[in-house]
Image (cartoon, rainbow, N blue to C red):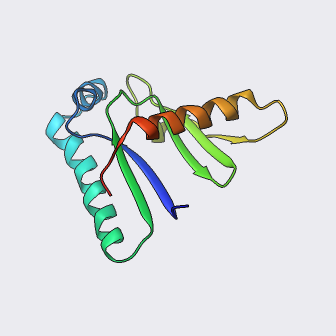
Amino acid sequence: MCGSRSLLLDPDCAAASRRAEEIRESYPSFVAGIRLSLERLAELADRGADLEVSVYDILPTWRVIGLDTTMFVSAFGETHEGHTSPMYKITDSPHGAFARGMRRFVEELRRNARRVI
């Protein structure tokens, strides 16, 4: 298994333009931030970091940080970014439908994403 896996919005997709418009950021500035993240992750990989980075092309809805079996989840709204939303800790439980659903969503997003690193 990879040391770290990341999914980022594809800066060249239509959803990137829509997202920039939603948060009232210029499209060039918005995608520059994504491209900078991709460049920095590529530099880490070039220095030996065990990374898998992919880009997806749908409008962001969830921000998910997964650590082992725990996920930290926040939502992207139409007028604010994920880092301004409350973060919820989601753990596995015998009847944890939300945790299972979030894992399924992330894995499907990854399955349909394009690996870049």
Q: Determine whether 104 is above or below 89 in the image.
A: above
Is there any visible trace of residue 85 in the rendered image?
no
Q: Nearer the viewer, residue 54 or 31?
A: 54
**Residue 111 screen position, x and y as percent:** 45, 38
Quarter of the picture holding the C terminus: bottom left
**Residue 20 screen position, x and y as percent:** 25, 31
The residue depicted at 49 percent of the width and 60 percent of the height is 4
Quarter of the picture holding the N terminus: bottom right
Looking at this view, name the residue that lies furthest to the bottom. 47
**Residue 26 screen position, x and y as percent:** 17, 34
Q: Nearer the viewer, residue 107 or 93?
A: 107
**Residue 15 screen position, x and y as percent:** 28, 27
Q: Nearer the viewer, residue 31 or 114?
A: 114
The residue depicted at 43 percent of the width and 51 percent of the height is 6
Looking at this view, name the residue that lies furthest to the right. 94
Say whether residue 108 is left or right of residue 59.
Answer: right
Q: Determine whether 38 is above or below 107 in the image.
A: below
The residue depicted at 35 percent of the width and 69 percent of the height is 45
Q: Determine whether 63 is above or below 70 in the image.
A: above
Q: Nearer the viewer, residue 108 or 70?
A: 108
Say whether residue 54 is left or right of residue 71.
Answer: left
Say whether residue 6 is left or right of residue 17.
Answer: right
Q: Determine whether 46 is above or below 92 in the image.
A: below
